[in-house]
Amino acid sequence: MADNDSVLDELYGVIESRKGGDPEKSYTAKKFAKGTDHIAKKIGEEATEVAIAAARRQRGEIMAESADLLFHLLILWADQDIRPEEALAVLRARRGVSGLDEKKAR
């Protein structure tokens, strides 16, 4: 898991560095400039693309669209000042907890 954490942390750092950047020169800066609602819609779009690829059993597309989804999720986290380790800590806290029990506890 540590390697995955470092990849997410590294990408998050790059994304965070684009905050306030020139939207004409950076895709990520453009997303930040369009605001949280736009970023949220993009996450919905990417999640839908993952679901469609999964329904079609297109392994390569599932991976590609999953990467896009993670990328846009990291943009949202940066927009909301949520660090990857904070979100991952929530997952770690759920270890050994039934998904049904966790959902009831919300």
Image (cartoon, rainbow, N blue to C red):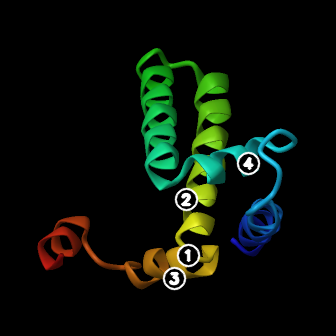
Residue occupied by mark 3: 89
Q: CA distance from mark 3 to mark 4?
A: 25 Å
Q: Which residue is mark 2?
A: 76
Q: Which mark is residue 82?
A: 1
Front-most of 7 and 82? 82
Q: How crowded is the residue under tag 2: few (<14 C-alpha within 10 Å), some, or many (20+)?
A: many
Mark 1: amino acid: Ile
How far across and down, in percent of the image, does residue 99 sit? 25, 66
Q: Secondary structure at mark 1?
A: loop
Q: Which residue is mark 4?
A: 28
Mark 2 or mark 1, earlier in chain: 2
In-image side of 31 versus 15 (left or right)? left
SS assignment at label 3: helix
Image quarter where the C terminus lies is: bottom left
Sequence-wise first label, 3 or 1: 1
Disc 3 residue type? Ala
Among the two numbered marks 4 and 2 on one chain, the one whose residue lies closer to the N terminus: 4
For disc 1, the neighbor class at 10 Å (few under 14, some 14 to 19, many from 20) is few
Q: Nearer the viewer, mark 1 or mark 4?
A: 4
Q: Residue furthest top?
A: 56
Quadrant of the frame with the N terminus: bottom right
Residue contact at pointers 2 and 1, CB within 8 angstroms: yes
Which of label 3 and label 4 is nearer to you?
4
Give how far apart the Cα atoms at labels 1 and 4 are.
16 Å
Q: Residue at x 43, y 49 (%)?
A: 37
45 relative to 23, above or below = above
Query: Decide: marks 3, 1 in contact (CB < 8 A)?
Result: no
